[in-house]
Amino acid sequence: MYHETVPVFRHYLGQMSAMVEKAGRGGALDTRIGNSFSAGQHFATAAGFSLRVACPLAGREVPDLPAALPPRLAVARATLGAMKPAEFEGASARVIRHRAGTADLEQSGQDFARLFGLPNFFFHLTMGYAALRMAGVPLGKSDFDGFHAYPEGFSFDKS
């Protein structure tokens, strides 16, 4: 379960940090899609989810994170970086009791990570990314995943 979660979370927390830096201080992080959280709150929630998922799988308590977004992302990433694969032995069968909104859930570690944790992490990451794009922050797929590359001036808009 370590390899399915920790490296994934660490990579995308790094991507979020770069997006936050690119957004700057102009208010883009306050942008909302509909009545959803702001972009900044989505990123903060994703950072919290990374530890809310990895810590129980590793048999650790979930630590408190700083409220300010850049340090929150950095602390979450550093906390994950201190985790070792050995802490996750038996994690797929470990029973995780948690809340989703007002629902009380009990899931195996495998279901918790795959059906709850990773999807929720990526939901909040994607919503934050989309809100920043809506605010005019020049983000592309490479900013999201860190892997894609396109030539200068490339656009999918063919009109």
Image (tube, rainbow, N blue to C red):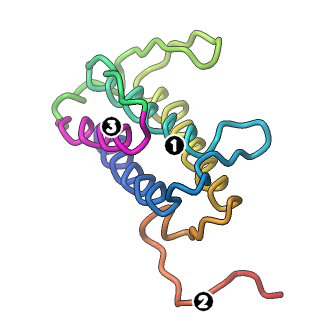
Q: Residue at x 54, y 30 (%)?
A: 116
Tag 3 near tag 1, CB within 8 Å: no
Residue 28 in the image, given as x and y percentages of width and height: 61, 54
What distance separates the C-alpha of mark 2 from that of mark 3?
A: 34 Å
What distance separates the C-alpha of mark 3 from that of mark 1?
A: 11 Å
What distance separates the C-alpha of mark 1 from that of mark 2?
A: 28 Å
In the image, residue 9 sits, relative to residue 138, either above or below, namely above
Residue 40 in the image, given as x and y percentages of width and height: 55, 43
Helix, strand or loop at label 3? It is helix
Q: Residue at x 60, y 43 (%)?
A: 123
Please state, as top left, top right, bottom left or bottom right, where the N terminus lies in the image: top left
Task: Identify which amino acid the numbered label 2 is placed on.
Answer: Gly
Q: Residue at x 24, y 29 (%)?
A: 88
- Closer to the chain start, of discs 2 and 3, is 3
Instruction: State the mark number for residue 62.
Output: none
Asked if residue 110 is among those painted magenta in the image, a careful observer would answer no
Q: Give the crowd class for mark 1: few <14, some 14-19, many >=20 residues within 10 Å.
A: many
Helix, strand or loop at label 2? It is loop
Q: Nearer the viewer, residue 140 or 114?
A: 140
In the displayed structure, does residue 56 sit left or right of residue 134?
left
- Majority secondary structure of magenta residues: helix
Task: Identify which amino acid the numbered label 3 is placed on.
Answer: Ala
Instruction: State the mark number for residue 76.
Output: 3
Q: Nearer the viewer, residue 117 or 82?
A: 82
Q: Residue at x 71, y 45 (%)?
A: 32
- Specify the segment rendered in magenta: 68-84
Residue wearing tag 1: 43
Residue wearing tag 2: 153
